[in-house]
Amino acid sequence: IRGSAEASLTLPQKFERRTGDVLVACGLYEISTYSFFSPKAYDRIGLPADSPRRRSITIRNPLGEDTSLMRTTALPSMLDALARNYNSRNEKAPLFEIATVYLPQEEDKLPLEKKKVMLGMYGEGYDFFRLKGMVETLLRELSVEDAEFARQEDDPSFHPGRCAALLLGGEKAGILGEIHPDIRENYGIGARVYAAELDFEALLRHAVTEKSYHPLPKYPAVTRDLALVCDAEMPVAELQKAIQNASGKLVKEIKLFDVYTGSSVPEGKKSVAYSIVLRSDEKTLTDEECDNAVKK
């Protein structure tokens, strides 16, 4: 008896494959690591003794202490892989893994299995902004909306001044930045290391899976440049949000093109310059309407 059966990938499976394709296109190599590690891994990434991330599933019959816990974070696994590459004298190692972590629940329930998109890299040409650009590319190609970046200073595994949280819909969905120098020394890596750990389910939840058609604009756009002097510590993302909120639907694009500090700017300040594209979907904008939007 002959027959046929139709089969297709589920939405999460398609999303996972697309995630891998985008990261490969960004120049990263996929790795696969064990889901269990040593209790010392939490010490090596600097987690405090009372950190909730230390609460792990203990394996009853482990091969040894180094494989006795189910991981709650994929960061130690990535740092192990980067350290192995560094000790093998590889000049650079851009890696990623779609890793599973295991979060314990009540005693009579199986652990909660969650997927993490883990990026890690070191070598010439890699820095915080290269890493952030890869994350932004991933968000764009996956059609993830409501994404923001916010300063993160209290994660012991990351450099306090070179670290950011990824927010989706206002909720934290990941972290990215430079690994703290003390942590990379724990792994014997003599180069700056950059890593990101993103929540796969949150990315999928905020992704637009159905595409809709938008007609090409009928009316011309007007471009205005805006330079603002602010405190040096002011995140430029906050300025961009304020510009968008003030001008509403007329603002179609906001592009940062310069950040300047020098003799013409007071000490402790910086000049931030934006190119702003204004357009109405209903008519051609007048100079007065554009001026009013810029004044707002």
Image: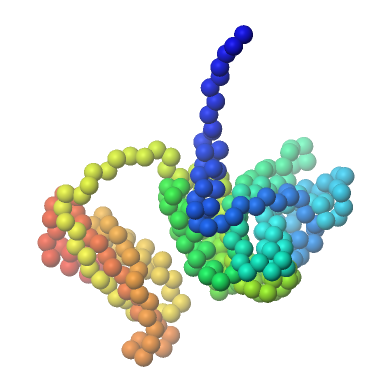
Q: Relative to 57, is 197 on the left or the right? A: left
Q: Is residue 55 visible?
A: yes
In the depicted structure, whether residue 146 falls above or below residue 126 = above
Which residue is at the front of the view, 115 or 234? 115
Q: Is residue 154 visible?
A: no
In the depicted structure, whether residue 138 falls above or below residue 154 = above
Which residue is at the front of the view, 265 or 100? 100
Which residue is at the front of the view, 109 or 62? 62
Q: x, y (%) of residue 184?
A: 69, 70
**Residue that appears at 49% across and 53% down:** 25
In the depicted structure, whether residue 264 falls above or below residue 77 = below
In the depicted structure, whether residue 14 falls above or below residue 134 = above
Q: Relative to 280, is 36 on the left or the right? A: right
**Residue that appears at 70% across and 47% down:** 102
Q: x, y (%) of residue 220?
A: 16, 56
**Residue that appears at 43% across and 40% down:** 209
Q: Relative to 213, is 219 on the left or the right? A: left
> What colouring method underlies this structural image?
rainbow
Quick one: which residue is furthest to the bottom in this view? 263
Which residue is at the front of the view, 114 or 97? 97
Using the rendered view, name the quadrant where residue 110 is placed. Answer: top right
Where does the C terminus fall, quadrant-wise? Answer: bottom left
Q: x, y (%) of residue 230?
A: 37, 78
Q: x, y (%) of residue 185?
A: 71, 73
**Residue that appears at 46% across and 52% down:** 139
Using the rendered view, name the quadrant where residue 1 is placed. Answer: top right
Quick one: which residue is furthest to the top in this view? 1
Q: How many marks?
A: 0
